[in-house]
Amino acid sequence: MSAVIEEHHDDHHHGPDKGIMRWVLTTNHKDIGTLYLWFSFIMFLVGGTMALIIRAELFEPGLQIVQPEFFNQMTTMHGLIMVFGAVMPAFVGLANWLIPMMIGAPDMALPRMNNYSFWILPFAFGMLLSTLFMEGGAPDFGWTFYAPLSTEYAPPSVTFFIFAVHLAGISSIMGSINVIVTILNLRAPGMTLMQMPLFVWTWLITAYLLIAVMPVLAGVVTMMLMDIHFGTAFFNAAGGGDPVLFQHVFWFFGHPEVYIMILPAFGVVSAIIPTFARKRLFGYASMVYATASIAFLSFIVWAHHMFTVGMPLAGELYFMYATMLIAVPTGVKVFNWVATMWQGAMTFETPMLFAIAFVILFTIGGFSGLMLAIAPVDFQYHDTYFVVAHFHYVLVPGSVFSLMAAVYYWLPKWTGHMYDEALGKTHFWLSFIGINLTFFPQHFTGLAGMPRRIPDYALQFAEFNMLSSCGAFLFGFSQLLFLFIIIKCIRGGKQATDQVWEGAHGLEWTVSSPAPYHTFSTPPEDLREAHG
Amino acid sequence: MSEEADIRTLRTVRKLLFAVVGMFVFGFALVPLYDVICDITGLNGKTAGQYVSSEPAVADTSRTITIQFLTNNNAGMPWEFRTEKRAMTVHPGELNQIDFYARNPADVTMTAQTIPSVTPYYAARYLHKTECFCFDQQQLAAGEDIEMPMRFIIDREIPADIKSLTLSYTMFDITDQHTSQQASD
């Protein structure tokens, strides 16, 4: 495998191929990382446009812009695209770029499969997006596609949705096999597991989660497919099935899935905060164990999404307490980040701003999660905007902010140029204000009883919804500034040093900037700097 | 990479692929597992199949239990479906009978399947049905009607806190599945 790469080195083949075929045929982890990151950014803009359609409709009570049928398609597609098309591929992109450089490996362990796992994605999402132009419209049953909405009452395009999910799932499984094999087998000689940077650790654990639950997702959509086309009755009560079963199987996948989207973010933040606090990460080992505990707990709490289906009291209590238990390892992490910053010589470059905002706003999202975990009050919060506020607080200023922090942090290493710091900070503050303006009022409308996934609402929610929509447009359009900053940085800027940031530690900072096309063809010997 | 490393890589990949296939199968295994768990715990208010009594029915006249009957049609089901009585007061252990009535007002032959559900869910395992139309499917020609007797015993072991329970039936239109099944037979 990588023997092939070594041979290439012997002859004159040093850089990438020219032209479009470079990208189609590439097996280079940096090229594939770049492809993943651009793909996810495009999906982020597509899903974001759908969010703005939703917010434009909700700007005022009553129906102004879209019909309820189309509104439902927008909420569904927005969720699916952001989860499977934006956040997950973006983290896979980071994994591709960074894991080999962080562990001193020449490339991913399975480069050809790496190419396949990326190129499946445009087909999966092309197929999903094509449903918008089909008769009967796109899927309109919410990103959680509960049966029987997604089986008996689904538009005909549901079959395309099912195959798109299958393809995206195959891509993630291939990607995570690659990550695990790379981390377990290609670490620089002498590097122990407990010497790995935390980003590599969190990705290792995330990859195991993916391998455990993506097949279950594939299973549940296959059951849907069979119910719709082959006359089975997994979720159809008339044939002896049970719609509640769907929710159990779905959330058995769905809860680990939300940690799949946040654990790599923990890794990113654990790399950035020590750099700009100029201190070593506080409690490295406890961070590793906390990540593993969160991953384990994610498998045994799924029914807290289903408190209102009519569970027995014992079930409600068990899932309530198990869910609250997750706050313990998560708290360990938050305290470790704060302790890392404590008495550090902090500076506030853009990546650090995003990382600090992550710690604060993710914690807010965690607290609202704790409120939702309380079974008796969940009966009131269930399916209201409070839930929407909660999961957007952990996903947008959580996962998405960590991704932006990561881009600003490693962009000089990728491009060889420093980005424009003033513009970066502007982007941060616009995003920070936009996001809070969008989602904070939704806590209030939710507690007051505004249901989610509804195109119209009662008059008393008008002011908060208007604020929310203004925030959404501010956040949405400030991402065009992000795009501009990235393109500007690719095209030129102040030459970046190898270490880029004064306080940066890790093997990726020992190679030159921009990182050469092939790094660590011979393994690094000095591993003292390996974990940040 | 050395040959030895290649072998290690393949070995890891094989293990991981095995895990993937295993988890896919596990997803499907959740279906019977779910039924078994519902069965054992009586969750979900699912009642068991036909009950065959091992001992003669002896009524426990010291207790009375009110059992209410609900009849629902699933969306799109046009049949008339009702019960002769809304509620009965019975003793645990005695054999009771109640009649249900169904009529097909449509102008085509239709097939129906009825699904029972008991509230509170933990009463489900104490409700034994010796005869129920829900064990079979009903096929009625256009305009045809049918009287359907249901016999049941409430177990003498039923917990003391259950003073009343509700047995709800939902009738589903399964004409499509029924005809496609016949076609494939």
Image (cartoon, rainbow, N blue to C red):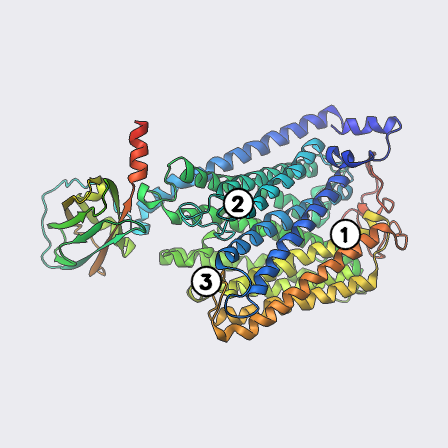
Quarter of the image with the N terminus of chain A in it: top right
Q: Earlier in the sequence, mark 3 or mark 2?
A: 2
* Callouts 3 and 2 on one subunit: yes
Q: Chain of mark 3?
A: A
Q: CA distance from mark 1 to mark 3?
A: 41 Å
A411 vs A482, nearest the viewer: A482
| In this rendering, position of residue B89 left or right of residue A186 | left
Indicate which disc, 2 or 1, sits on the residue closer to the N terminus: 2
Which is more toward the observer, A266 or A417?
A417
Q: What residue is rendered at 43% in x and 67% in y?
A: A380
Residue underneath mark 3: A382
- Height in image: B22 above or below A531? above
Position of residue A28 in the picture relative to residue A220 (left or right) = right
Q: Circle 2 — which element?
A: loop
Q: Give the number of the mark in front: 2 or 1.
A: 2
Residue A103 % position (x, y)? 75, 41
Residue under label 1:
A532
| Picture coordinates of residue A226, whole percent (x, y) | 42, 37
Using the rendered view, name the quadrant where residue B15 is placed.
top right
Amino acid type shown at disc 3 = His
Q: Residue at x 90, y 55 (%)?
A: A494
Whether residue A298 can be seen here: no
The residue indicated by pointer 2 is: A134
SS category of the residue bearing label 1: loop
Is residue A391 depicted above or below A219 in this figure? below
Amino acid carrying mark 2 in the image:
Met
**Mark 2–mark 1 distance (CA, rounded to whole Å):** 50 Å
Residues under numbered marks 2 and 1 in contact, where contact means CB atoms less than 8 Å apart? no
Question: Which of the two residues, B168 or A213, is positioned nearer the viewer here?
Answer: B168
Nearer the observer: mark 1 or 3; the answer is 3
